[in-house]
Amino acid sequence: MIQSSLQGSYALPTFFDLFAVFLFAFSGSIKAIDKEYDFIGIFIIAMVTSTGGSLIRDTLLQHGTPSPLLDYRYLLCVFVAGIVAMFLYKYHKHFNFLINIIDAISLGMYAVFGTQKALFLGLSIFSAFIIGFINAIGGGMLRDILMKEESHFFKAGQFYAVNSIVAITIFLILGIGMKLHAETSATIAIVVATLLRYLAVKFDLRTVAIKKWYSK
């Protein structure tokens, strides 16, 4: 098993974390409303979408109570987001740009934070990679499973899950390989992942379905 240590640590900004949870819960609520769910379904989907990645991460790591359950502010953000979504549903398209921006930043941020937490608990870099990836996309995957939809993470399309893989790879190379401080490594990884997501949206950068390789 390959184990390595980081120099220092990266602290996830609490305000941004709570704001990201609110917006993910809002987007999950909108999707639930589109599916004609009642208020119970809306709040469940909001909860899963916004905190699912963290819940899966901490459950797999078996290191205490999952963080979203320790701080009431996370659940409060989910509750408020669900209420706001129900009242502002017909205006939700006006918030798409903001949600996309926060989504782009938080994707790399959660990927890096999950990877770091796994490394601190003594997991190998390969295991930490998996934990970081799950932390980044776990909420969206759980949402799709509960809503019986084929997850877009598995299909060819605009770079999304790829961005979290890039963020984790850069973080590990800089933090483990080059021994840069974790804060510096994380910042660079998040900026690159965010820029990649922006370019993917702007220029419609996409992955390709493997089956298409054989149809040429």
Image (spheres, rainbow, N blue to C red):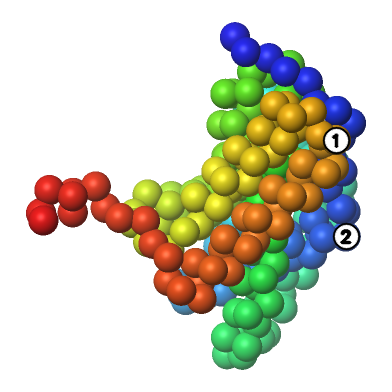
Residue 137's spot in the image, x, y percent?
A: 56, 48
Q: Secondary structure at mark 1?
A: loop
- Residue at left offset 64%, top offset 41%: 170
Q: Amino acid at mark 1?
A: His
Q: Nearer the viewer, residue 151 or 208?
A: 208
- Residue at left offset 74%, top offset 50%: 188
Q: Would you say the residues marked 1 and 2 are in contact, meaning their CB atoms lie under 8 Å apart?
A: no
- Residue at left offset 56%, top offset 63%: 197
Q: Nearer the viewer, residue 197 or 72?
A: 197
Which label was assigned to residue 203? Answer: none
Crowding at dot 2, Cα within 10 Å, few <14 / some 14-19 / many 20+, comes out as few
Residue 33's spot in the image, x, y percent?
A: 52, 75
Q: Going by the picture, which residue comes out furthest to the front?
A: 178
Residue 57's spot in the image, x, y percent?
A: 65, 35
Q: Earlier in the sequence, mark 1 or mark 2?
A: 2
Q: Is residue 35 something that shows in the picture? A: yes
For residue 126, above or below residue 154 = above
Q: Which residue has dot 1 on it?
A: 181
Name the image quarter holding residue 29: bottom right
Q: Nearer the viewer, residue 110 or 159?
A: 159
For residue 215, above or below residue 37 = above
Marks 1 and 2, how far apart at CA: 22 Å
Q: Which residue has dot 2 on it?
A: 15
Q: Nearer the viewer, residue 27 or 207?
A: 207
- Residue at left offset 66%, top offset 51%: 108
Q: Quadrant of the N terminus?
A: top right
Q: Given this view, does label 1 or label 2 mark the residue nearer the observer?
A: 1
For residue 160, above or below residue 184 = below
Q: Is residue 138 something that shows in the picture? A: no
